């Protein structure tokens, strides 16, 4: 089509100006894509990490257990609930837990410990706990050869108590019936690292826990993992609807780790503001360029109109020129953004010291290559360029041939 | 040359719209930079303040090995001597000795594990904000069986003022379990979740008795100026670090915070570079356009005997004036926004970075010297961006310049 | 004999290969002091090119130009600029003036380049304005002057530094005949009074009428060189 040919050739007329403009827009694209990639990648990565680590994507509690945990706020008939939740195709794993903060006694030291009763099989389907066993053997529900219930310990706790595999661990707590809970367990595994979430935890099987705390068929928490973390909110809403009778609350990870989520949102907001400023500055430059390019061709447009060209055609010409410029810029930006983002996605930037955001540790910043991180910047650059070209476009379309011919 | 000055000034106003847009471009970049700087400054100060003033202190002294093992047997035995030594160090304003241990805290309704701190009430109030954080009841008054806890902990244990709490802890030197009864004498509230939920505070002497030690685990220090805690050239660090003592500043105690703040400094630098590149590109384009329009005129100037070098300086001067105007606009705009936010602050409540709850809004801090530096930097970038166009103008052959451009 | 202008085998071509255009092909001429010479020829004959080469505004493809016996083809950029500043006055067809300067500032410009002290400058500007009949309009910017007035300011500027040579490229092309005639008469008078050398590139018959010598160009070559008594 003639107009496309014209537009392309016009861009090539003033090479230097076009190059500079393309550099500017391309730089903007690159920056946007880079920033988006960093935030999407890092956050996605982190969310996956901690939801698969111990939180799960959705949790179920009794009443306001999440805010005010109490031994007595427990969920009844957990096995039935688990079975019904498992039927949902979005669910990849469900597990139940009992929490009983206790004093851990080892040799001649005590330390407070978070004692957690788990279903070893279900837990290994829902979180990464099994993979975190550094020494020893993963928990089972059976009693050990020595006649004790097995326990897994976090690294720091084990170190503080000077306990190792095979040692005896004494736990003291308060049972559901108010009595003192006091039991001996055998350490069968050490899990995690001194910095990981489970460092001060002790894991027992549900049976062991129930015996320890004199509990019945109750649990404190159900943790559910889904196919993808983005399904959490929707899933929670739907599941909650089925629990209108009981006082059960279903919470997506955004609520379970609320502080992290809020911090992440705040950080994202800041990012979006920065990106906005970048695009603004690039756009002003583009406006300047396109405006000038239009004005200096006043005479030429005058001639075009004098010989019968429609105003709309001139408007379209200007818009088309801007469109091509922006597309070329995005392609140029893509050439640089792709390898950089790829490197970020695969290798990432390792932090010298992990960053703590809302209690969750970022050890490395990862990038992400997706339609979102590569496509949205293009959309933004192209649309802002088109937006900014509207004014010069209109001006050009409204040139009166006579005035134009009399002009310089 | 005086002529160049007046020529340059008049030239930039020939095309007011273009000049205005260019100024807008540069001024926006500058304003963004200024705002970022003030924001990072405000955030850093706020986070350091919250971190050190709430409970951590500017620095802490422990017995070597305590922090690694968290072993309550590893405590400072010669503490009285140490206090005298601290009183003689001029940079240290106040100190607060503490004992600490993990324990079980049980009420009639619930039981949970906490860290129990035994503090010297009076000294503690000079170092941390514990006293100011009280919302109910009264602060520690060296009376027997006093215990103060956070409001979230009180909710969790379902207790109020006057209710009973039992601390169960294993003692040092042997590990025997000891239990004691306390009554809730006060409730405090901090922005920090951990302090509200996981901490309980009793009097030092009772803590020592409870744990069966006659020393302290930790001494929190407050300096005269918090920056002194980052000045590792001071003699006190050498004096207070040896085989027995380990004295660390907040930077080492909360390395995550320290490194996050360092990274923020970098981000100002990176933002500056990005901004400069964007501004430069837009500016070069603008300059070239203004030169093209004047090709014929430049041809005449050269024909009439103007040296190429003078043309070069003319363009640079024009860039300089544009830069000057942009700096004024940018400082005004950026400065106003920064000032406005330095008064009203930016709300980050509910978020937590590096373990610090950002409950207080972040108030921007304007550092005039830094503003001047940044403005100067942008001005320099503006002038430097004009070198390429100016060069081009100076190398024009008059005959070609006077050929009517397309 | 010292000539004001001398060209030796002067050539100027543009383009390459097939599209090679020889704007000027082996021009050899001399012009002496006090001449009032017109270089004429049809469009594309090379007259503007010849004038530009003489004035050092363009670089020859081959050949040399001597002004006051100095080979300007060998001069460096700064030297050439200074030479033009001190020895040549230029008048172009249009857009002679710096738009942001007033009439008197435009005239003053060259003297500023020459670092002439301020009292001397003001004196000469006043004299020159009178000579071209523009007293009272010195504060006006070019946009506020008519075409003829602008050209007169151009003439004033070209003359104020008392150059040995004034080159004028189609100075009357944008003027109506009445104004053009007045301008030319003024220049003729300056030529006779001060013995200033004028070289025009033109196809205006009014200039040809007044010229004392007419050099004709055709397709880049000098085809005729006629002296007459005016």
Image: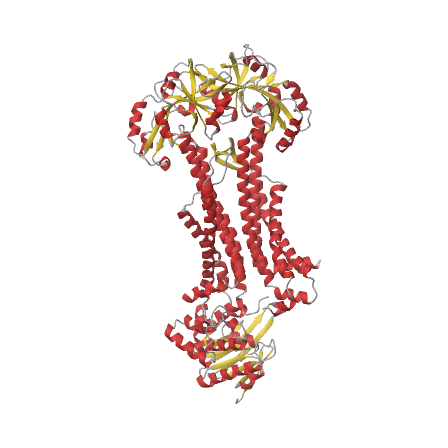
Residue A307 horizontal side relative to residue C222, left or right: right
Task: Give the colour scheme of this rendering.
Answer: secondary structure
Say above or below: B403 vs A241: below
Residue B169 drawn at (x, y percent): 43, 16
Residue C37 drawn at (x, y percent): 52, 83
Residue lying furthest bottom:
C229
Q: Nearer the viewer, residue C9 or A389?
A: A389
Tell me the residue at 54%/86% (across/down): C210
Quadrant of the drawing holding the N terminus of chain B = bottom left
Residue A107 drawn at (x, y percent): 45, 14
Residue A407 horizontal side relative to residue B382, left or right: right
Q: Answer with the quarter of the image where residue B176 lies.
A: top left
Q: Answer with the quarter of the image where residue B212 lies.
A: top left
Looking at the image, can residue A96 be seen?
Answer: yes
Residue C118 horizontal side relative to residue A58, left or right: left
Q: Nearer the viewer, residue B381 or A132?
A: B381
Residue B289 drawn at (x, y percent): 54, 61
Tell me the residue at 61%/64% (across/down): A298
Quadrant of the drawing holding the C terminus of chain B = bottom right
Tell me the residue at 65%/61% (across/down): A397
How many numbered badges does the structure rendering display? 0
Looking at the image, can residue C67 be seen?
Answer: no
Q: Nearer the viewer, residue A171 or A41?
A: A171
Residue lying furthest top:
A147
């Amino acid at each position: 089509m003639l107009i496309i040919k014209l537009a392309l050739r016009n861009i090539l007329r003033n090479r230097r100006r076009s190059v500079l403009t393309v550099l500017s827009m391309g730089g903007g694209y690159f920056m946007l894509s880079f920033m988006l990639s960093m935030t999407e990648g890092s956050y996605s990565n982190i969310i996956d990490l901690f939801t698969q680590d111990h939180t799960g994507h959705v949790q179920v509690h009794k009443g306001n257990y999440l805010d005010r945990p109490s031994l007595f706020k427990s969920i009844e008939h957990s096995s039935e609930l688990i079975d019904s939740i498992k039927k949902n195709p979005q669910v990849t794993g469900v597990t139940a837990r009992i929490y009983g903060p206790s004093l851990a006694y080892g040799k001649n030291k005590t330390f407070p410990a978070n004692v957690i009763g788990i279903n070893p099989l279900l837990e290994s389907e829902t979180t990464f706990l099994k993979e975190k066993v550094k020494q020893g053997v993963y928990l089972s529900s059976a009693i050990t050869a020595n006649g004790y219930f097995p326990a897994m310990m976090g690294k720091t706790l084990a170190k503080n108590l000077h306990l190792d595999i095979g040692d005896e661990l004494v736990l003291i707590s308060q049972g559901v019936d108010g009595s003192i809970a006091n039991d001996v367990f055998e350490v069968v595994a050490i899990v995690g690292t001194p910095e990981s979430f489970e460092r001060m935890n002790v894991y027992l099987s549900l049976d062991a826990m129930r015996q320890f705390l004199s509990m019945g068929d109750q649990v404190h928490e159900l943790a559910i993992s889904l196919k993808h973390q983005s399904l959490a909110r929707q899933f929670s809403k739907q599941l909650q609807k089925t629990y209108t009778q009981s006082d059960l609350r279903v919470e997506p990870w955004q609520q379970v780790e609320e502080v992290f989520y809020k911090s992440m949102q705040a950080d994202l907001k800041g990012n979006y503001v920065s990106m906005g400023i970048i695009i603004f500055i690039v756009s002003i430059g583009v406006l300047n360029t396109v405006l000038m390019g239009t004005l200096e061709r006043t005479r030429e447009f005058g001639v075009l109109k004098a010989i019968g060209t429609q105003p709309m055609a001139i408007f379209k010409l200007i818009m088309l020129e801007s469109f091509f410029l922006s597309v070329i810029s995005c392609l140029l930006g893509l050439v640089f953004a792709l390898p950089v983002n790829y490197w970020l996605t695969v290798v990432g930037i390792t932090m010298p010291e992990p960053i703590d955001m809302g209690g969750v540790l970022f050890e490395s910043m990862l990038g992400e290559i997706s339609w979102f991180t590569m496509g949205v910047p293009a959309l933004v650059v192209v649309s802002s360029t088109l937006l900014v070209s509207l004014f010069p476009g209109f001006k050009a379309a409204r040139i009166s041939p006579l005035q134009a011919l009399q002009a310089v | 040359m005086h002529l160049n000055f007046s020529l340059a000034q008049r030239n930039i106003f020939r095309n007011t719209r273009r000049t205005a847009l260019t100024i807008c471009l540069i001024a926006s970049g500058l304003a963004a930079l200024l705002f970022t700087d003030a924001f990072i400054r405000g955030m850093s100060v706020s986070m350091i303040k919250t971190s050190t003033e709430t409970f951590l202190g500017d620095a802490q002294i422990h017995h070597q090995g305590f922090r690694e093992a968290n072993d309550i047997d590893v405590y400072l035995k010669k503490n009285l001597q140490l206090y005298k030594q601290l009183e003689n160090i001029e940079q240290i304003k106040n100190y607060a000795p503490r004992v600490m241990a993990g324990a079980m805290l049980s009420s009639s309704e619930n039981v949970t594990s906490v860290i129990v701190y035994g503090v010297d009430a009076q000294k503690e109030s000079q170092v941390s904000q514990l006293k100011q954080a009280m919302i109910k009841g009264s602060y520690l008054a060296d009376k027997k069986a006093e215990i103060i806890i956070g409001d979230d902990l009180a909710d969790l244990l379902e207790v109020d003022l006057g209710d009973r709490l039992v601390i169960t802890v294993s003692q040092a030197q042997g590990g025997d379990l000891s239990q004691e009864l306390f009554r809730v004498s006060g409730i405090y509230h901090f922005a920090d979740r951990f302090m509200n939920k996981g901490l309980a505070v009793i009097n030092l002497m009772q803590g020592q008795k409870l744990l069966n030690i006659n020393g302290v685990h930790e001494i929190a220090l407050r300096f005269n100026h918090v920056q002194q805690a980052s000045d590792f050239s001071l003699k006190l660090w050498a004096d207070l670090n040896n085989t027995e003592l380990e004295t660390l500043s907040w930077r080492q105690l909360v390395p995550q915070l320290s490194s996050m703040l360092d990274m923020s400094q970098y981000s100002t630098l990176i933002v500056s570079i990005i901004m400069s590149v964007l501004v430069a590109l837009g500016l070069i384009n603008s300059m070239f356009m203004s030169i093209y329009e004047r090709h014929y005129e430049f041809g005449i100037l050269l024909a009439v005997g103007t040296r190429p070098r003078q043309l070069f300086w003319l363009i640079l001067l024009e860039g300089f004036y544009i830069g000057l105007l942009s700096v004024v606009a940018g400082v005004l705009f950026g400065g106003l926004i920064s000032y406005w936010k330095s008064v009203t602050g930016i709300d980050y409540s509910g978020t937590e970075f590096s373990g610090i709850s950002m409950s207080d809004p972040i108030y921007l801090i304007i550092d005039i010297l830094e503003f001047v530096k940044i403005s100067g930097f942008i001005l320099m970038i503006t002038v430097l961006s004009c070198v390429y166009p100016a060069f081009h103008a100076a190398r024009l052959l008059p005959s070609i310049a006077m050929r009517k451009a397309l | 004999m010292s000539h004001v202008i001398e060209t030796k085998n002067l050539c100027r071509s543009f383009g390459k290969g097939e599209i090679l255009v020889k704007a000027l092909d082996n021009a050899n001429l001399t012009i002496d002091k006090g001449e009032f010479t017109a270089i004429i020829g049809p469009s594309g004959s090379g007259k503007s090119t010849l004038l530009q080469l003489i004035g050092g505004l363009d670089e020859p493809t081959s050949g040399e130009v001597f002004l006051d016996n100095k080979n300007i083809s060998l001069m460096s950029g700064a030297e050439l600029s200074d030479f033009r500043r001190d020895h040549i006055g230029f008048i172009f067809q249009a857009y002679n003036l710096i738009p942001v300067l007033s009439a008197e500032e435009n005239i003053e410009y060259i003297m500023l380049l020459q670092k002439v002290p301020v009292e001397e400058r003001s004196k000469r500007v006043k004299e020159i304005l009178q000579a071209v009949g523009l007293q009272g309009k010195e504060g006006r910017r070019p946009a506020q002057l008519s075409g003829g007035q602008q050209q007169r300011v151009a003439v004033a500027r070209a003359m104020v530094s008392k150059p040995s040579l004034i080159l004028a490229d189609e100075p009357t092309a944008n003027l109506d005949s009445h104004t053009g005639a007045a301008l030319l008469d003024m220049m003729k008078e300056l030529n006779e009074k001060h013995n200033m050398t004028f070289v025009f590139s033109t196809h205006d018959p009014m200039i040809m009428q007044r010229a004392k010598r007419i050099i004709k160009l055709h397709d880049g070559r000098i085809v005729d060189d006629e002296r007459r008594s005016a």
